[in-house]
Image (cartoon, grey):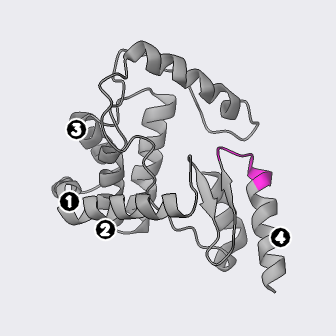
Amino acid sequence: MRLRRIEDELGDDVRIATRSFLLRPRPDPARTLERFREYTRSWLRPASDPDAPPFRVWATDAGPPSHSVPPHLVAKAAATLGDDAFRRIDQALFRAYFAENRDITDQATLLALWREAGLPEDAFARAADPALAERVFAEHEEALVHGVTGVPAVRMEGRPGLVVGAQPYETFRTWIRRALADAS
């Protein structure tokens, strides 16, 4: 959300290209609901930022989400419908996971989010396209090559270095403005 604000603020000088990085590339059978609830306490730090979107420590009995692939496939499927569709499902997935504590690896939940985002129901099947899965895993591998270790991770094309983690808006803004100034 913060990066979209920067994109809106800087207009044609910045274009955000969202790529896949899988925090959990495969299901983890040892991931219990209690261990996951404890993990979500780490969300309190980014939630304390003044401009943070809503975060809530996991309080439901849904999940825990098994792995990262299903929501990435749904996001890629939405992207085939255009940038607006991608933005709507991206926001819906973020809200469902961090604010509403919904299991975004559950197919019924993903279909419900697709509908809530107002996307054409017949296009949801695109998430099962093997080519999208190949793309998700290829982007994940590329992220590993660039040193990505967490999300969000922001990298500027043609420049070394990353900003990793839920940083305040001003951190991203300052970093990007410096890069733009150096380029001109």
Q: Residues within 10 Å of mark 4 (few under 14, many from 20)?
A: few
Q: Which kind of residue does numbered mark 4 sit on?
A: Arg
Q: Is residue 56 visible?
A: yes
Is 87 magenta? The answer is no
Residue highlighted by disc 1: 126
Q: Which residues are magenta?
A: 165-171
Residue at disc 3, secondary structure: helix
Residue highlighted by disc 3: 107
How much space separates mark 3 and mark 4, taking CA atoms? 42 Å
Q: Residue at x 18, y 55 (%)?
A: 128
Q: Nearer the viewer, residue 29 or 163?
A: 29
For residue 51, which quarter of the picture? Answer: top right
Q: Position of residue 164 (x, y in %)?
A: 65, 50
Q: Residue at x 71, y 71 (%)?
A: 10
Asked if labels 2 and 1 touch by Cβ distance under 8 angstroms, the answer is yes
Q: Which kind of residue does numbered mark 2 sit on?
A: Thr
- Above or below 109: residue 137: below
> Which callout, 4 or 1, points to the residue nearer the camera?
4
Residue at disc 4, secondary structure: helix
How much space separates mark 3 and mark 1, taking CA atoms? 13 Å
Query: In the rendered structure, which disc, 3 or 1, sits on the residue that comes first in sequence?
Result: 3
Residue highlighted by disc 2: 80
Q: Which kind of residue does numbered mark 3 sit on?
A: Gln
Q: Residues within 10 Å of mark 2 (few under 14, many from 20)?
A: some
How much space separates mark 2 and mark 3, taking CA atoms? 19 Å
How much space separates mark 1 and mark 2, taking CA atoms? 8 Å
